[in-house]
Image (cartoon, rainbow, N blue to C red):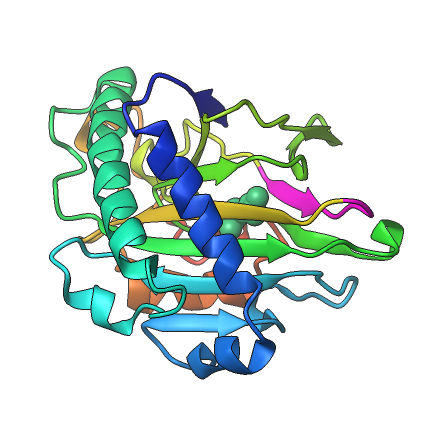
Amino acid sequence: MKQVINHGVPEDLMDKAMEVYEEFFNLPVKQKENYAEKAETLYTNNPKHHASKEHNYWKEVLEHNCNIDGQDKQTWPSNPPTFREVIGAYSSEIRKLSMIIFDLVSKGLGLEAGYFGKGHGQRMFDNHYPICPDPSSTLGTCGHCDPNLITICQQQVYGLQILKNDEWIGVEPLPHAFVVNFGLLITVVTNGKLKIVAHRVVTNTTQTRTAIGTYFCPANVVEPAKSFVGPDNPPLFKPFKWGTEFLPHYFNNRAVYHAALEAFKINA
Ligand code: OGA
Ligand code: NI
């Protein structure tokens, strides 16, 4: 997990996006629930995807696609009235940033230029964590690894932690920075070379927290890249489709951080 500054996304657009999501979450529950149980744009204050036996989670989530050809905009909230305009501009900027990051990641991993292609999916996960009267009894988000290639996240209030040597360590927000996080699929692409960190979100008693997460997801089949496989490095994972094959395993066992990968291990 890294924080990126000088990323080229205008700071005032980042501020506007944060305001627009906060305004959305401040709407009456009835209005937000117009988006409950929809597939394309989904609001929930009972995040079943994120629950486990051990914890209740203290958050609301708004999820939506952001294909930047404009098609998905029709399903986005129309209130606050600037939502579609601001988030449309924001998603285009984040997409540009994702291209740069994918390029750097390909270079850094020794993959051929353009390995990740241009067709990656883009979906927003906007998490809102209200003030919590008893943060010791609940988490904002349980420990997990992201199920995608990379996540670009905007935060301005503390709450995010990563698991390092069995200890949870805070990721202090830097002003107008993005947190960039690798998802589990990077472990597959690198044939097990890159291990992915688990992260979680804690709540607090004094400030609400909104985090704008953009998930970048593969358009094609996921498999170990050729440059990570050879006579001495047999492939550790079989190829799979992300949405239909991988995600069901992920949502089944999200609280065991790397569990979703097990089903795709060769000789497992
Ligand atoms: C996520 C996530 C972090 C946050 O949505 O995958 O880890 O700060 N979010 O809400
Ligand atoms: Ni995450």
Residue at 61 percent of width and 40 percent of height? 199
Res 268 visible: no
Image position, residue 216 (x, y; %) = 31, 46
Image-based side of 19 in relation to 7, left or right:
right
Residue at 71 percent of width and 61 percent of height? 58
Identify the image quadrant of residue 150: top left
Which span is picked out in magenta? 198-206
Image position, residue 34 (x, y; %) = 45, 82
Res 39 visible: yes
Image position, residue 84 (x, y; %) = 28, 60
Identify the image quadrant of residue 156: top right
Q: For this rendering, which residue is in front, 153 or 13?
A: 13
Q: How many marks are shown on the rendered structure?
A: 0
Identify the image quadrant of residue 114: top left
Q: For this rendering, which residue is in front, 223 or 21?
A: 21
Image-based side of 211 in relation to 226, left or right:
right
Image-based side of 240 in relation to 35, left or right:
left
Inspect the magenta stretch and tell me whether residue 204 lies in it.
yes
Inspect the magenta stretch and tell me whether residue 90 lies in it.
no
Q: For this rendering, which residue is in front, 219 or 29?
A: 29
Residue at 88 percent of width and 55 percent of height? 134
Residue at 55 percent of width and 34 percent of height? 197
Image position, residue 185 (x, y; %) = 36, 44
Q: Is residue 27 above or below residue 175?
A: below
Image-based side of 265 in relation to 139, left or right:
left
Q: Is residue 98 above or below residue 45?
A: above
Q: Is residue 222 above or below residue 77?
A: above
Q: For this rendering, which residue is in front, 81 or 259?
A: 81
